[in-house]
Image (cartoon, rainbow, N blue to C red):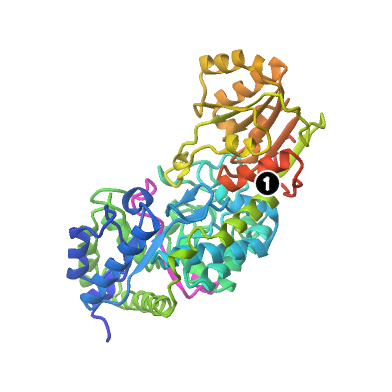
Amino acid sequence: MPLSLEQALGQKLMLSFVGAEASAEILQTIARQHIGGLTLFRHNNVTDPAQVRELTSALQRAARDSGQPPLLIGVDQEGGTLIALTGATPFPGNLALGATRSPELAYKTGYAIGREVAAMGVNVNYAPVCDVNVNPRNPVVGPRSFGEDPTLVASLAAAMVEGLQAAGVASAAKHFPGHGDTESDSHHGTPVVLHDEERLRRVEFPPFAAVVKSGVKMMMTAHIALPNFDGGSNLPATLSRSILGLLRQELQFDGIIISDALDMGAIEQGPPLIVEAIAAANAGVDMLILTIHNDQRGIHAGLLQAVRRAMISPQAIMDSAERVLALKSWVSEQSQPSLDVVGCGEHRALAAEVAEHSLTLVRDTVHRLPLKLSAEARVVVILPRPQDLTPADTSSYEKPALADALRAHHSNVDEFIVPLNPSDSDVAAVRERLGAYDLAIIGTINAVDYPGQSDLVNAILERGVSVVAVALRMPYDIQAYPAAPTYLCTYSLQPPSMEALAQALWGHIPFAGQLPVSIPGL
């Protein structure tokens, strides 16, 4: 049955709500108006896989009862530092995949993630990240990228898209036209990227062209400005008709263009947000991600009035709705796996394989590895407490697991957990206790940005204790403690990476990974 203009407009909206169950408010919204779908967030909606499946079933039932097409239900299930759904297999993330250099593992990971989210009733995954992380100071992309080589990023991103969609889940590749070379976070303001057209076509654009060729269903925009490409404009790409026009006309993308979340600082908030939403619609955005921080009902009303007053083309609304309905038809034809696939043995084995093939030994000038310790030797593990470094981060949910992994190989292991940015007194306290240990295994998380971590590592090196330094996130940490003689990278603090690290330290598996980014000065 054809949609009315108002129903077609509703298809533009990806709403959100708070609750592990379908709230009365969201059920009333679904009963009152058509919507495109909903985004589920870990902190708002998720407790465990069975609960998510029950929640998504209730939401789809409400849409069906109100005579709507099926809902698109999206999550950020990237793996690594951004995992929206608890209980799922903890894959190490994109930078770890970059270190494996394996499109086959990227495909298998995408397929496994797709199967797991589909089992929970999710039919859109806001993944993979196609950004080429060429900037060591990038505060928001980092380990979410496959690396700094556009060709490698293109290959792995395309493979992951194919895997996700083979599992019956629509992939929303992000963040077009490329968020990899920014030094600010679009959650807090508009990053301005000053590259010219030649540079953008050579570095930033190729992964997006590759995923279009692979058949990606959706493309998520970035709230970044490209004034030297966009006629001097500092408009976020989400609001730029010329940038999104390139995606349609030159890259020939015919799927759904979806905005990044509209509660981010690069987009004007409060009453001006309705103008931003209208601008996004006119720029060519098919779907708008609205969060609980946005006036979702007011934005819908404002968009509808903008259509009535010819501020938005009715034909553009109908064209967007047609694309959304086509995707809804596709997802409705996919079969839903059993919940048994979530965290199944096959997927855990795959996560372990990715972790093992990603481990990268950067330096071991003293030939400390593999470890050869007597049974009486005392080992201490020193780790910073994981925190969310950006709003697009779930690291704070992780419990450090390295000490437990090491105890499978050596019984005499203690653990010190320190703040992310240790104070002088924290450093002194750890240094004082090290006399009782023969080996310190020190994990760091973005140590270049947290000088307390570099102070801690350097103090331990000066103490004369044998040290193995491990970058648990980005590989650049050795810049903060360049005297470390043994240095390696895991790209992830997920349990599979910690278990693989323990095996490699004792020589049971090789360090098979290759750096997916270069380290300045190394």
- Relative depth, front residue between 202 and 136: 136
Reading the image, the residue beneath label 1 is 517
Name which residue type carries label 1.
Val
**Relative image position of residue 288 (x, y in whole percent):** 35, 62
- Asked whether the viewer can see residue 357, the reply is yes
Q: Is residue 99 left or right of residue 330?
A: right
Image quarter for residue 485? top right
**Relative image position of residue 437 (x, y in whole percent):** 67, 20
What number of labels is visible? 1
**Badge 1 density bin: few <14, some 14–19, many ≥20, Cα 10 Å:** many
**Relative image position of residue 500 (x, y in whole percent):** 66, 45
**Relative image position of residue 17 (x, y in whole percent):** 27, 55
Q: Is residue 265 magenta?
A: yes
- Relative depth, front residue between 125 and 403: 403
- Asked whether the viewer can see residue 206, the reply is no
Answer above or below: position of 352 versus 360. below
Q: Main secondary structure of the magenta part?
A: loop
Q: Is residue 144 left or right of residue 293?
A: right
Answer above or below: position of 157 versus 254. above
Residue bounds of the magenta highlight: 248-267
Residue displayed at 58% across by 62% down: 346
In the picture, the quarter occupied by the N terminus is: bottom left
Answer above or below: position of 212 versus 142. below
- Relative depth, front residue between 439 and 156: 439
- Relative depth, front residue between 81 and 201: 81
In the picture, the quarter occupied by the C terminus is: top right
Q: Is residue 456 magenta?
A: no
Residue displayed at 63% across by 47% down: 134
Image quarter for residue 29? bottom left
Residue displayed at 56% across by 30% down: 383
Q: Secondary structure at mark 1?
A: loop
